[in-house]
Image: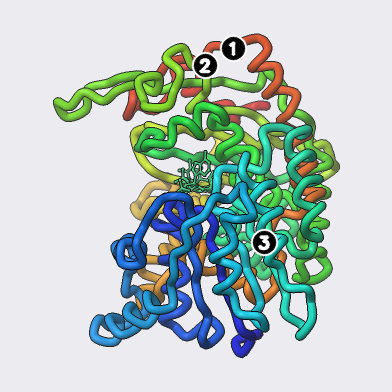
Amino acid sequence: MRNQTAKLDLIILGASGNLARMKIFPALFALFSQGLLPPEARFYGLARRSLSQEEFREQIMRHLTCRYTPEHSCAVHIERFLAACRYCRGDYRSPDGFAELGSLLRPDRNRLFYLALPPEIFPAAAANAAGLAQNGTDGAWTRVVLEKPFGRDRASSDRLNRELLRQFSEEQLYRIDHYLGKEMVQNLIVLRFANQIFKPLWNSRYIRCVKIDWQENIGIEGRGDYFDHYGIIRDVIQNHLLQLVTLIAMREPATLTADAVRDRKLEVLRAMETVALGDLVLGQYAAAELNGRKIPGYTAEPGVRPDSLTPTFARLRLRIGNDDWREVPFIIRAGKALAEKKSEIRVVFRNPESNIFCTRDRCPPANELIIRIQPDEGIQFNIVSKTPGLKMRLQTKELDLSYDTAFADTVIPEAYESLLLDVINGEKALFIRKDELEAAWDIFTPVLHEIETAQIKPEPYAFGSSGPEAAREGICNNE
Ligand code: NDP
Ligand code: BG6
């Protein structure tokens, strides 16, 4: 493992928050317990609230899991990990807030700052973090990890970048999109380019449409202040799901280096048409009764305006105006508070124009390749097969590579484990480059402004349902 001997101080700003507790510290512990972090690495948490060291460690401990190590040795790892964690109380906006932290950081260590904060605080926090940056003597680096959302539209994203780039270079910034760290998402590039069979088929001649379906069966879970300001398009579509589209549509990069991969993704983003209002269905979840329990609707959630028009569901069509994909709609469907939790990509192939199995009015169903990102990671290929028997009858069956069985003895890493290790190793392929971000905002900014200016009312759908009526019919056929 590269850089394992490098020395590291890792600083989490917003250490008392949900992301830090639920994702970042558990991921760090997973790496720590496998010996993948530099020896003597230390983890500093900064936040405004008053917490004793014991309370801070107790908060961290609650979410650590022993997935990689047997129970008996795990307790020892936990004890060592917690001993390396230290809390500092401080205000992100004031240099004084960073004074205690500054006095604790070790002079010759690499410094990794993780901004697990609401985005409006990024510039002030980054400016204060810059005051603690290594100056490059001893070869020690400083890197900064930023969480999405990176702005609300192209202009605010540009502003944010300008402010951050006053303090740090583009090379030092790691814009995280945790979907890129998911195992199955990392597998997309392997599936497409390590399997020769797909290469000639991967274009509009053989593919009719690509559907990306993202569903959660929970509401906004206490994140009303944040969500109401952003909505589902900014929360997951402009970033996580658009990244999936780029990985499905990009041409093969010349190498696997960060810039070669990101250049290919950028080509897709730049070829994409801006989203049209007519291609959009918006929804907002409403109260419902589930298993005898009354569940409040979106506008009754804490932090949400009672007259909010923020969409919690969207279905839209993306078009890529290049020779490979001009005829192929990419249909994205994303919603909170739906019937199930799932995230999958479905590549729908074309029906043959003529086929010995076609009758006068019917041809065999089209093949589909389904990439299940979560839960139940896997790759499924729907093929037409003869039903055993004396007659020639056809039916669709599944070739299913389910990770549960195919990799039964393998622990699937959490996205944040993979991404944090990449930051430490200086690997940038899975992080969003500034020009990618700009192109991503260009696709959505006009329609986001139109929705807000025209005060488009989202269609209500019941909590736990399959979404708004208008988004139920299939739109993949005959486009
Ligand atoms: P939280 O609301 O839990 O806040 C994180 C921390 O920021 C808190 O510990 C709080 O610390 C501090 N904070 C909150 N509000 C303010 C404020 N107005 N002024 C100053 N400090 C504030 O957020 P999350 O941890 O959920 O998210 C952090 C970042 O990560 C956000 O950008 C979010 O969009 C992003 N993100 C979160 C995900 C998740 O799963 N939670 C997933 C993907 C991205 P204190 O008050 O103690 O200073
Ligand atoms: C975050 C969004 O980026 O991703 C959340 O802000 C969403 O709204 C989450 O719930 C989903 O992540 P995962 O890894 O649980 O699919």
> For the residue labelled by badge 2, is the local secondary structure a helix, a strand or a loop?
loop
Which quadrant of the view contains residue 64?
bottom left
Distance (Cα) linking label 1 and label 2: 7 Å
> Viewer-nearest of labels 3 and 2?
3
Q: Amino acid at mark 1?
A: Ile
> Viewer-nearest of labels 1 and 2?
2
Give the x, y percent position of residue 37: 53, 81
Residue hosting label 2: 309
Sequence-earlier tag: 1 or 2 = 2
| Disc 1 crowd, CA 10 A, few/some/many (<14, 14-19, 20+) | some
Distance (Cα) linking label 3 and label 2: 34 Å
> Closer to the camera, 105 or 256?
105
Residue sitting farthest toward the bottom = 5
Distance (Cα) linking label 3 and label 1: 37 Å
| Labelled pair 1, 2 in contact (Cβ < 8 Å) | yes
Give the x, y percent position of residue 152: 67, 33
| Disc 2 crowd, CA 10 A, few/some/many (<14, 14-19, 20+) | many
Give the x, y percent position of residue 71: 25, 81
Q: Amino acid at mark 2?
A: Leu
Residue hosting label 3: 144
As drawn, the label of residue 456 is: 1
Residue sitting farthest toward the left = 292
> Closer to the camera, 417 or 465?
417
